[in-house]
Image (spheres, coloured by chain):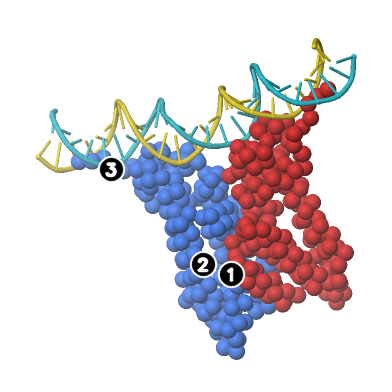
Chain colours: A blue, B red, C cyan, D yellow
Amino acid sequence: MPREKQYNEAEVIESAMGVFWQNGYKSTSLRMLSKEMGINQFSINASFGNKQNLFLESLKLYRTKLQQLLKTFEENSNGIESIKNFFYAFAEFSNQNEYKRGCLIINTMSEFGLEVDKEVGALISNYAEQLKALFKKNLEFNTTKDNDTIKRQLNYLDLAIGGLGLATKVKDNTAIEDYIEMTFNNL
Amino acid sequence: MPREKQYNEAEVIESAMGVFWQNGYKSTSLRMLSKEMGINQFSINASFGNKQNLFLESLKLYRTKLQQLLKTFEENSNGIESIKNFFYAFAEFSNQNEYKRGCLIINTMSEFGLEVDKEVGALISNYAEQLKALFKKNLEFNTTKDNDTIKRQLNYLDLAIGGLGLATKVKDNTAIEDYIEMTFNNL
DNA sequence: CTTAAAACTAATCGATTGATTAGAAACAAA
DNA sequence: TTTGTTTCTAATCAATCGATTAGTTTTAAG
């Protein structure tokens, strides 16, 4: 007997994700979201509760998109070159349209630092740990490396992918390509 | 005949800079600034006009502080090792107290991306160009490098210092040290 | 049809934002 | 002391924020 929803929740989250990606959390208002999602504030509340939770759902969607890159990375884990391929895929993903939006996860890390919401922080940490595990797996492809070398190179890659995320928001593609190439000269 | 100001403008800018550094531009309200600066909103307006201009003045002050690092860098320009020393000095500066605030300039780049205020953007660009000039000077200390190598290494260092700025906001000192050491293994 | 449940529109809530105002207080020259 | 200028405090402005409400519309079961 009830009236049907006139929108698809998965579709409107996609729109919300785009707005948060472009503007960050604090600079995104519910009115901006309402406009881009094509539903009013009441419906946002009905489907997602509040702004914070909609942001979390947007991050989850973003995470599932990145997961496809991680899947390719996992399936093609043959050492350093595989890590480099992931760096390029990550940069390309961040530049997937005309906007310079960077990476939503790294943007969020930068916006909130260590004072991040608990659930958001958990999502970010989970992603970071999964990525580091893949880095580690590929670094260990060269069995001559000692544990200390692995540990240092892992920290190097972890911070480098963060820097790459920031760079995709403010630097041009040539600089980014030079950066990736140079990053892997050391490894 | 007039009444004297009961505060020193240079001192209250120092306080304002700290608030912006910790919270970013948008998350800093005039009431937070008023409280930390020890003067009321009217006085902020009287001395600095508006929030945007106070932010610009805070950035200028931050820039003068970084200028001391650049001065040391300039005076001790003997090649790659000098660049590395600057990286360490930059990381230490960003961690100068108990807070994890990162670098105000890089935080601002991340917060506004390419849609930054004109004057703020000019200040950032000016700083970035000055820094790149110093990188270039030290890279060219090794006269065997061709121009293309210099250009690639310059982009590498430019993006790496950005990544370091982000890292000082969210990573621990061990990871940062590993990152710097690894970064200079390639050069 | 009638009816009940859910989704819709539009208006509005209190709180907070950046900015401004009115009026009191301070202070040195006249 | 009087006067004129500036700084100060405290209150308040319109705009916007996230969130919510009241009331209408849609829909399908009965």
Pointer 1 with pointer 3, Cβ within 8 A: no
Q: Residues within 10 Å of mark 3 (few under 14, many from 20)?
A: few
Residue at horizontal 84 percent and vertical 62 percent from the top: B72
Q: Are marks 2 and 3 on the same chain?
A: yes
Pointer 1 with pointer 2, Cβ within 8 A: yes
> Counting residues from the N terminus, which is met first, the one under dot 1 or under dot 3?
3
Q: Residues within 10 Å of mark 1 (few under 14, many from 20)?
A: many
- Dividing the image into 4 quarters, which one contains the C terminus of chain A? bottom right
Q: Which residue is mark 1?
A: A158
Q: Which residue is mark 2?
A: A128
- Three-letter residue code for mark 2: Ala
Q: Nearer the viewer, mark 1 or mark 3?
A: 1
Residue A4's mark? 3
Q: CA distance from mark 1 to mark 3?
A: 46 Å
Place of residue B8 in the rendered image (x, y in percent of width and height, measured from the top left): 77, 39
Name the residue at the bottom extreme: A144
Q: Is residue B158 visible?
A: no
Q: Chain of mark 3?
A: A
